[in-house]
Amino acid sequence: MRCKKCGWISFDWLETCGKCGKSMEDEKRAIGSFISDKEPINWFKMDLSAVASDAKDVDPKASSAISDIDVSDLVDSAPEVKAEEIDLEEVELKRIAQNQDFQKALDEIAG
């Protein structure tokens, strides 16, 4: 919620503004119900129909378990490499070169 007196943004469950102390009751009434900080929230097994009972786009039968979310399109499909095939010296040299390039860029910015 944003305090109408000073503009400070604070949590919905607070009774007063954290900056100026103004009562936030009017703002709380304007936004309607809120989630209390006293109730534990499990974001991954939340009943969506209870949160948005008046929403038309929410499918109450939809699963909200995190294990049901398909993230395969977010992961690069890199070929599998066995640990024995990794040249640690080459990896270290690449890391050093990247660090040097990064440091050079920082030095240019700092001027």
Image: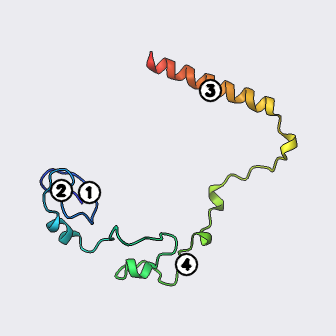
- Residue 58 horizontal side relative to residue 92, left or right: left
Badge 2 or badge 3: first in the primary sequence: 2
- Indicate whether 5 appears above or below 56: above
CA distance separating discs 1 and 4 = 31 Å
Residue type marked 1: Ser
Badge 3 or badge 1: first in the primary sequence: 1
Q: Are marks 2 and 1 in contact (CB under 8 Å)?
A: yes
- Residue 43 horizontal side relative to residue 96, left or right: left
Q: Which residue is mark 3?
A: 99
- Residue 77 horizontal side relative to residue 20, left or right: right
- Circle 2: element type: loop
- Circle 4: element type: loop
Q: Which residue is mark 1?
A: 10
Q: Which residue is mark 4?
A: 63
Q: Are marks 2 and 3 in contact (CB under 8 Å)?
A: no
Badge 1 or badge 4: first in the primary sequence: 1
Q: Which residue is mark 2?
A: 3
Q: Residues within 10 Å of mark 1 (few under 14, many from 20)?
A: some
Instruction: Name which residue lies at 24% across and 60% down.
Output: 1
